[in-house]
Image (cartoon, rainbow, N blue to C red):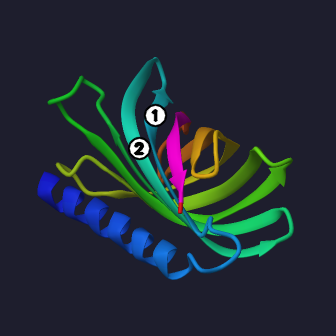
Amino acid sequence: MKYTINTLVLLLVLTVSAVAQSYSHEESNDRANLYVGFTNISVPFDNFQGINGQAQVKLVRFGVVRIDVAGDLAVFFPGGIGDVELYTFQAGPRAGVDIGKKVTLFGGIHFGAFTTFNSDATYSYLPGGGIQVKLNKRVYVQGEYGRQFLQDAPFSFNRLSFGVGGRF
C-alpha cells in the first residue's frame, strides 16, 4: 500500500510541475504551489502528529483574489512511526486574498476520505483556512487550521498544519 501512495504522490508532483511549466510564459509565474509540512490532529483526550502535502493549481485571479483547486494528503501516526497509520485524501476549492506583497490569507473546503487501509474508508470533509507568508519569489511558509469532520462520527477534530512550500 505504501508503494501506491508513493506512486500517487509522484504522479501529483509531476502533474503540477507540468502544468506550472506550461504556464511559465505568462506574467504571473505562480500558477501552482507545492507544500510539505507537519500536521497535528486533536482527538478527544489525545493528539496525533503526522505529515501532510498539498498541491494547488490556480484557476483564476481577480486582482488580489485568487481561486485555486487544491489537493491534500495527510498521514498521522497515533502510536508512533511504524504503528497504525491514519490517512486523509481530500481535494476541493480554495480562495486566497493577498494582503500586501508578502502575505496571503486563504480559506477553503476539502472533501475526501479518511482511512487506515486496514478498514473501510469513511467520507470526510475539512473546512479551514490559514496564512501564507512569502519569504522570496518562490518560497513561502504556511500555517493552517481546519476542522476535520467524519461521516457518522460523534465528534470532529481540530487540525493544525505548518510547513514550507514552493511557487511555480
Instruction: Please tell me whether mark 1 sits on a helix, a strand or a loop.
Output: strand
Magenta span: helix, strand or loop, mainly?
strand
Q: Check if mark 1's residue and mark 2's residue have beta carbons within 8 Å.
A: yes
Q: Is residue 135 visible?
A: yes
Residue 60: percent from the left, percent from the top?
Answer: 72, 77
Q: Is residue 1 visible?
A: no
Where is 23 relative to 137, above or below?
below
> Label 1 crowding class (10 Å Cα cut-off): few <14, some 14-19, many 20+?
many
Residue 134: percent from the left, percent from the top?
Answer: 67, 43
**Pointer 2: what residue?**
52
Q: CA distance from mark 1 to mark 2?
A: 6 Å
Q: Quadrant of the N terminus?
A: bottom left
**Residue 31 occupies quadrant:** bottom right
Taking the spot 54% from the left edge, 34% from the top edge, the residue there is 162
Q: Is residue 105 left or right of residue 117?
A: right
The count of marks equals 2
Residue 54: percent from the left, percent from the top?
Answer: 47, 54
Where is 27 relative to 151, above or below?
below
Instruction: Please tell me whether mark 2 sits on a helix, a strand or a loop.
Output: strand
Is residue 48 magenta-colored? no
Is residue 161 magenta-colored? yes
**Pointer 1: what residue?**
39
**Kind of residue indicated by mark 2:** Asn
Residue positioned most to the top: 45
Magenta stretch in the rendered image: 160-167
> Label 2 crowding class (10 Å Cα cut-off): few <14, some 14-19, many 20+?
many
Taking the spot 46% from the left edge, 30% from the top edge, the residue there is 40
Taking the spot 30% from the left edge, 60% from the top edge, the residue there is 9
**Kind of residue indicated by mark 1:** Thr
Q: If you read the primary sequence from the N terminus, does the residue marked by circle 1 or circle 2 appear first?
A: 1
Residue 168: percent from the left, percent from the top?
Answer: 53, 63
**Residue 145 occupies quadrant:** top right
